[in-house]
């Protein structure tokens, strides 16, 4: 992403600094090798985003600009960076060009000294970057000598594996489930550390067991595991599992609870996640036994206003920072949807549906929708 617009005075100072940096760095001695394998880990993390489209101003999870990619990759290791090329360079250790190593960041400047682009050095004069509109995250050659090199040190403790679980908690749980004769089947990996350094896991033919000191060991398999994996495993908003896969009380579906939410599955609805205030509202209504039933979408962002929602078999729960989370269903929901959902004059719901004389009602930011039990008509009250 291009650096932010600067005032004339600040811009002039920045240009002078960049040109001075470039001149001074040319005479710097080579820097010692990066600690451990941090540089390789950075390159490997950047490579997980290959094929993601470029979008100006984007910082994941599915689209990136150049500095957005750098920010997200290093953020994965707990290194917080700003979303601007000039600031990212200022926050780095400055190196000579011949000192660059995989995992360093290449900062390109033009003939005025403006830092306009960056990417993650992958070795052999190649870097990983999101370059321009119409392109994708990919490896490309460094095409000019007009660049600076920055390095972010490995975070404290990087490369130190987490302690193994006491008396192999994963192995104990696997045995308790039935070992190779369980739904998981035979192991296909040994016990490994998770990329975030917090936990450990074993993959099996039909599922996985994940463990952390705080959550214990739990299994996940099938479509629920498939969705969790597609979201990014433990690195997502859901975090680690805190239950095995269980059957819902009515016997119709299956679920796993996680640190930050849940995934519910039925043959009819497939697997969908629900978390945060929306999950709390749904749980308060009785989970899948409520009139809402099972989720039929993951939590999604509203198209034009700052809010979130999940659709369920029997209705929806909408949330915004100003209104909190509220359900809407039936004819009232249908009328609200026909008006344009939260983009209508009614805005977001500020209450769940409640009884009124002769019918039902839901309150919204811009008014109330009333349903007549006799005529089934919905009117704005």
Image: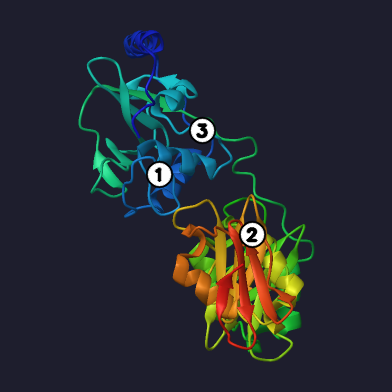
Lower position in the chain sequence, tag 1 or tag 2: 1
| Residue named by callout 2 | 239
| Residue named by callout 3 | 81
The label on residue 58 is 1
Quarter in which the N terminus is drawn = top left
Quarter in which the C terminus is drawn = bottom right
Report the residue at 68% width, 69% height from top.
352
Report the residue at 72% width, 53% height from top.
163
Instruction: Answer with left or right where residue 252 lies relative to residue 5.
Output: right
- 212 over 285 or under it: above or below: above
Q: Residues within 10 Å of mark 2 (few under 14, many from 20)?
A: some
Report the residue at 52% width, 67% height from top.
229
Residue lying furthest bottom: 251
CA gap between label 3 and label 2 equals 23 Å
Q: Position of residue 68 (x, y in %)?
A: 42, 40
CA gap between label 1 and label 2 equals 23 Å
Closer to us: mark 1 or mark 2? 1
Residue in the foreground of this view, choosing between 78 and 2: 2
CA gap between label 3 and label 1 equals 14 Å
Dot 3 falls on a residue whose secondary structure is: loop
Lower position in the chain sequence, tag 3 or tag 1: 1
- 205 over 302 or under it: above or below: below
Q: Position of residue 65 (x, y in %)?
A: 35, 41
């Amino acid at each position: 992403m291009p650096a932010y617009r600067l005032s004339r005075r600040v811009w002039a100072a920045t240009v002078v600094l960049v040109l001075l940096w470039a001149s001074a760095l040319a005479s710097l001695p080579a820097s010692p090798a990066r600690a451990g394998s941090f540089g390789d880990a950075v390159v490997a993390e950047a490579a997980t985003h290959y094929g993601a489209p470029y979008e100006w101003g984007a910082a994941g999870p599915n689209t990136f600009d150049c500095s957005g990619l750098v920010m997200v990759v290093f953020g994965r290791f707990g290194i917080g960076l700003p979303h601007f090329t000039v600031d990212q360079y200022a926050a780095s250790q400055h190196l000579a060009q011949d000192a660059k190593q995989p995992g360093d960041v290449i900062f390109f400047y033009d003939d005025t000294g403006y830092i306009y682009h960056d990417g993650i050095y992958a070795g052999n004069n190649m870097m990983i970057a999101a370059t321009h509109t119409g392109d994708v995250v990919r490896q490309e050659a460094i095409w000019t000598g007009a660049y600076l090199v920055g390095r972010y040190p490995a975070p404290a403790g990087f490369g130190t594996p987490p302690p193994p679980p006491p008396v192999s908690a994963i192995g104990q749980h696997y045995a308790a489930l039935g070992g190779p004769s369980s739904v998981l089947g035979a192991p296909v990996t040994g016990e490994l550390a998770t990329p975030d350094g917090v936990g450990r896991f074993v993959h099996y033919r039909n599922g996985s067991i994940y463990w952390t000191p705080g959550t214990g060991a739990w299994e996940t398999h099938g479509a629920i595991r498939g969705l969790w994996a597609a979201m990014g495993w433990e690195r997502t908003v859901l975090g680690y599992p805190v239950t095995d896969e269980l059957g819902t009380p009515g016997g119709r579906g299956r679920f796993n609870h996680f640190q930050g939410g849940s995934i519910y599955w039925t043959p009819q609805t497939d697997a969908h996640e629900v978390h945060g205030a929306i999950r709390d509202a749904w749980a308060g209504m009785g989970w899948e036994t409520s009139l809402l039933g099972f989720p039929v979408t993951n939590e999604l962002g509203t198209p034009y206003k700052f809010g979130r929602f999940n659709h369920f078999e029997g209705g929806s729960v909408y949330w915004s920072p100003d209104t909190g989370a509220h359900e809407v269903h039936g004819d009232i929901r249908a009328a609200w949807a026909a008006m344009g959902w939260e983009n209508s004059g009614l805005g977001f719901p500020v209450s769940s549906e409640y009884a009124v004389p002769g019918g039902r009602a839901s309150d919204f930011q811009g008014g109330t929708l009333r349903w007549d039990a006799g005529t089934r008509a919905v009117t704005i009250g």
